[in-house]
């Protein structure tokens, strides 16, 4: 399978009623694309990080009633899982693609990672202008990097359930989304910019 982008039908997956029905669409429409794109991104990151990283595709296994509102692939340096580790994500909601470096609430050393980010707060603000921030991986909303404040990182450090994700959002209609090669290149350039923060987080 070639690198394929995401089309209208893929985004419409999230309007399908019923857990089983939506999961079937995720598995048949989206996950094969994740496998190809994710393998390419994992190889790229392994080379650029100098150590092996592993592709994980969200299974949504804990769900019993509510169908997922989004789905994603994650890449981490742990073969067994990604949620307890800093990781890279690419995924979609019904109206956009997200490309993240993700620090979610399950991180055991969240305080140390947050402090490292606070120590490099000015460096974060030097990232590209089109970068966005999310404080909750389960929500669609993000805000521009320019609006990032110290208090957001302090909350990430001090509140157990707080999260911090940084990267890019691409609207579903963006030309790069439909073109698998352009999408993968955009993800690579996003990750490349964020690698220093990922590495500092691992060292924390």
Image (cartoon, rainbow, N blue to C red):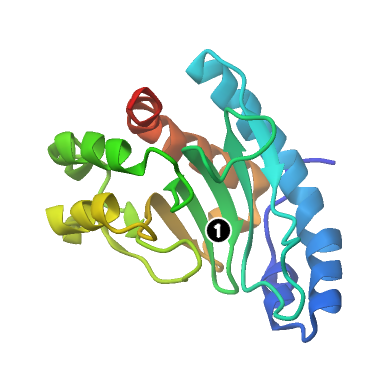
Which quarter of the figure has residue 42? top right
Give the percent coordinates (x, y) of residue 132: 33, 56
Residue at screen point 56% across, 15% down? 51
Residue at screen point 26% across, 49% down? 157
Give the percent coordinates (x, y) of residue 106: 48, 49
Which quarter of the figure has residue 66? bottom right
Q: Which residue lies most toward the top here?
A: 50
List the residue tagged with mark 1: 175
Q: Is residue 120 left or right of residue 19?
A: left
* Residue 198 to residue 139: above or below: above
| Mark 1 neighbour density, 10 Å: few (under 14) some (14–19) many (20 or more) | some
* Residue 33 to residue 155: above or below: above
Which quarter of the figure has residue 112? top left
Residue at screen point 51% across, 67% down? 138
> 100 or 79, which lies in front?
79
> 145 or 138, which lies in front?
138
Q: Is residue 1 left or right of residue 36?
A: right
Give the percent coordinates (x, y) of residue 83: 55, 46
Q: Is residue 164 left or right of residue 54?
A: left
């Amino acid at each position: 399978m070639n690198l394929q982008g995401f089309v209208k039908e893929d985004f419409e997956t999230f309007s399908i009623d019923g857990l089983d029905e939506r999961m079937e669409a995720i598995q048949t429409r989206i996950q094969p694309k994740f496998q190809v794109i994710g393998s390419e991104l994992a190889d790229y990151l392994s080379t650029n990080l100098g150590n092996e990283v592993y592709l994980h595709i969200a299974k949504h296994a804990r769900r019993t009633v509510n169908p997922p509102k989004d789905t994603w692939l994650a890449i981490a340096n742990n073969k067994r899982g990604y949620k307890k580790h800093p990781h890279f994500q690419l995924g979609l909601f019904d109206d956009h693609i997200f490309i993240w470096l993700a620090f979610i609430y399950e991180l055991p050393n969240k305080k140390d990672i947050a402090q490292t980010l606070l120590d490099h707060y000015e460096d974060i603000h030097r990232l590209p202008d089109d970068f966005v921030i999310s404080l909750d991986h389960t929500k669609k909303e993000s805000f521009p990097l320019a609006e990032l404040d110290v208090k957001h990182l302090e909350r990430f450090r001090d509140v157990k359930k707080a999260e911090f994700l940084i990267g890019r959002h691409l609207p579903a209609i963006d030309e790069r989304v439909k073109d698998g090669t352009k999408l993968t290149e955009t993800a690579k350039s996003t990750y490349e910019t964020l690698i220093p923060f990922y590495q500092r987080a691992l060292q924390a």
